[in-house]
Amino acid sequence: MIDRDDPRLRLCIVTDDLRDGTAGLVDRVLAAARGGATMVLLRLKHADARVLVEVGRALVSALTIPVVVSERLDVALVCGAAGVHLSPRSMPVMALRAHVPAGFLIGVSVSEISDLEHSSLADYVTIGPVQGSGSTGLGMDTFSSLASASGKPVLAIGGIDVATAPAVMAAGASGIAVIHAVLGTPDPAAAAAAFMAALVS
């Protein structure tokens, strides 16, 4: 188990796409790590297992920060990743524990109170989207309530920028997870550094 102040949870970078190939994605993630990113979540929605393994191995080999794989325990284990991240509809955390090495991280996504029952044995949860278009975001009050009720270290995700990051931390987050706000910029290192400065201010 990990605690709320675990430094690995401060700034999680979520992969976006392979528009510049595996090497290009790895380069962008490496730049984010140089800027201070503390964890990477490998999530490529339209990639098959073979591609995920290729990208996962490349990230694990290149990085000194933890790589966690979205949904695919098989890919995470083959890649030597640090953990897996599940949706509330994935295999129960308890069922996975017997099949993973000691210290292997298991995270669960949460977006409503009913999701918390699936996360009781997780190491951490992500809660979001904190902010979205129209009425799709949880809002800060709901986020704070879910964070408190979870009893877990929390990564906030969804619509967070440098300006709103401190408020999210004050509302109960251990850290934030971002996608395009870092990897979608021309300078991922500078973008990550700006987030890190906001998170520790």
Image (cartoon, rainbow, N blue to C red):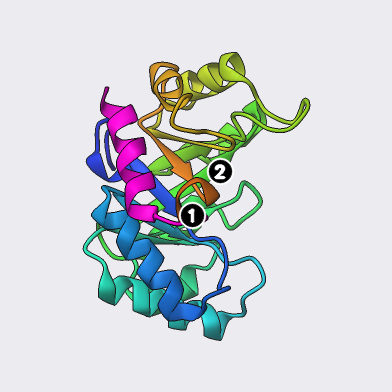
Q: Looking at the image, is 147 positioned above or below residue 133?
A: above
Looking at the image, the residue that sits furthest to the front is 186
CB of mark 1 within 8 Å of CB of mark 2? yes
Q: Is residue 156 left or right of residue 34?
A: right
Rendering coords of residue 145 (x, y %): 54, 16
Rendering coords of residue 36 (x, y %): 26, 47
Residue 194 part of the magenta segment: yes
Looking at the rendered structure, the kind of residue marked 1 is: His
Classify mark 1: residues with Cα within 10 Å, few (<14), some (14-19) or many (20+).
many
Circle 1 sits on which residue?
85
Q: Nearer the viewer, residue 161 or 119?
A: 161
Residue at disc 1, secondary structure: strand
Q: Is residue 166 something one can see in this rendering?
A: yes
- Picture quadrant where residue 121 is located: top left
Looking at the rendered structure, the kind of residue marked 2 is: Ser
Q: Residue at x 41, y 79 (%)?
A: 23
Q: Residue at x 38, y 57 (%)?
A: 40
Q: Is residue 82 something one can see in this rendering?
A: no
Rendering coords of residue 85 (x, y %): 48, 54
Q: Is residue 15 left or right of residue 88?
A: left
Q: Looking at the image, is 42 positioned above or below residue 162?
A: below
Q: Real-space Cα distance between discs 1 and 2?
A: 8 Å
Q: Nearer the viewer, residue 47 or 159?
A: 159
Disc marking residue 109? 2
Specify the segment rendered in magenta.
184-201
Classify mark 2: residues with Cα within 10 Å, few (<14), some (14-19) or many (20+).
many
Residue at disc 2, secondary structure: strand
Our reading of the magenta stretch's main secondary structure is helix
Q: Residue at x 48, y 68 (%)?
A: 73
Q: Quadrant of the C terminus?
A: top left
Q: Nearer the viewer, residue 18 or 185?
A: 185
